């Protein structure tokens, strides 16, 4: 009879997940895990994940920053192509920066029993899909209060745009009512697409202001075959404040949130 002997062999795996190559090439390494964290170089099970906040938001998150403020409260902020949000406690709050504000005079038009309000704002500079909110506005259409929400605009022309409200107007109104409007930072592009700058679209193809685009002339933004890059945020901390970094020109263009209310 033959006997088989065995012995224990120590397997010394490196900590962390290594996927630079194939699972066969990454010798003595962890290649794939789920619900695992490393403590003192050894893998340890974690209990999984649970939904912290079920509130919905506009768009898909493109950048996320998490930090602890000076009072040791955990904070998070994330940006989408439409808005910037803060996660505080068990809620998500819209904190998109205001890019401009203006006073409006004789500015609101709405039909009887309608939910579409036309806003007259000279040279508003908005595009369809941008957001606005109002303060110090009179009641519109007999029973519509605009100061209770943020509204997405549908542009009619350079001087007017329309918004949709939740309440139907009880009376018709034509170019009357004053208020103060705040324009949020312009919305961006949700989907990436190739073709920018000097290499975008076709040469001599009616895609620029002069209609005779040369080798050193970029295509116009409104051209039919022009496409834009996906909109990204770049967020960082300065103490407990959060900054937006303009990566193209490498300078800080604004403090987005100061936690004075905490």
Image (cartoon, rainbow, N blue to C red):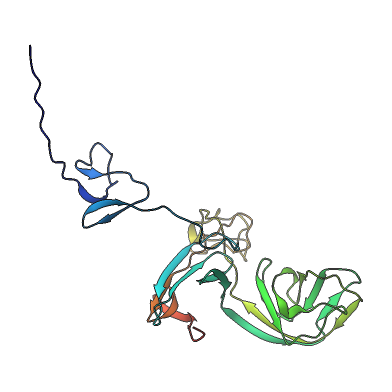
Res. 247 in view: no
Q: Quadrant of the N terminus?
A: top left
Residue visible at 49% across and 67% down in the picture: 78
Q: Quick one: 178 or 253, which is closer to the camera? A: 178
Query: x%, y% of residue 93?
Result: 57, 72
Q: Quick one: 149 or 202, which is closer to the camera? A: 149
Residue visible at 90% across and 69% down in the picture: 113
Q: In screen coordinates, is 190 left or right of 73?
A: right
Up-down: is 22 above or below 148? Answer: above
- Examine the image and state in which quarter residue 250 appears: bottom left
- Examine the image and state in which quarter residue 73 appears: bottom left
Q: Quick one: 67 or 246, which is closer to the camera? A: 67
Residue visible at 10% across and 21% down in the picture: 4
Q: In screen coordinates, is 200 left or right of 8?
A: right
Up-down: is 179 above or below 231? Answer: below
Q: In screen coordinates, is 99 left or right of 171?
A: left
Up-down: is 45 above or below 213? Answer: above
Query: x%, y% of residue 60?
Result: 54, 59
Res. 252 in view: yes
Query: x%, y% of residue 253?
Result: 46, 80
- Examine the image and state in which quarter residue 140 appears: bottom right
Query: x%, y% of residue 214?
Result: 53, 61
Residue visible at 23% across and 42% down in the picture: 26
Number of numbered discs overlaid on the protein picture: 0
């Amino acid at each position: 009879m033959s006997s088989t002997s065995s012995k224990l062999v120590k397997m010394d795996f490196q900590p962390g997940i290594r996927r630079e190559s194939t699972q066969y090439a990454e010798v003595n390494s962890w290649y794939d895990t789920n619900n695992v964290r490393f403590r003192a170089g050894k893998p340890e099970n974690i209990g999984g994940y649970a939904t912290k906040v079920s509130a919905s938001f506009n768009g898909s998150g493109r950048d996320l920053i998490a930090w602890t403020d000076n009072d040791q409260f955990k904070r998070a902020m994330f940006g989408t192509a439409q808005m910037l949000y803060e996660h505080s406690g068990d809620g998500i709050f819209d904190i998109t920066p205001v890019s401009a504000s203006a006073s409006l005079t004789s500015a609101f038009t709405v039909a009887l029993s309608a939910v579409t309000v036309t806003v007259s704002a000279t040279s508003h500079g908005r595009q369809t899909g941008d957001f606005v909110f109002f303060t110090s506005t009179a009641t519109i259409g007999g029973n519509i209060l605009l100061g209770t929400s943020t509204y997405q605009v549908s542009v009619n022309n350079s001087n007017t745009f329309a918004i949709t409200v939740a309440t139907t107007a009880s009376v018709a109104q034509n170019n009357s009512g004053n208020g103060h409007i705040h324009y949020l930072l312009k919305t961006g592009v949700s989907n990436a697409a190739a073709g920018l700058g000097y290499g975008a679209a076709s040469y001599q193809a009616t895609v620029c202001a002069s209609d005779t685009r040369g080798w050193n002339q970029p295509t116009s933004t409104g051209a039919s075959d022009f496409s834009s890059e996906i909109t990204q945020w770049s967020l960082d901390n300065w103490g407990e404040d959060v900054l937006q970094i303009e990566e193209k020109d490498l300078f800080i263009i604004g403090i987005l949130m100061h936690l004075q209310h905490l």
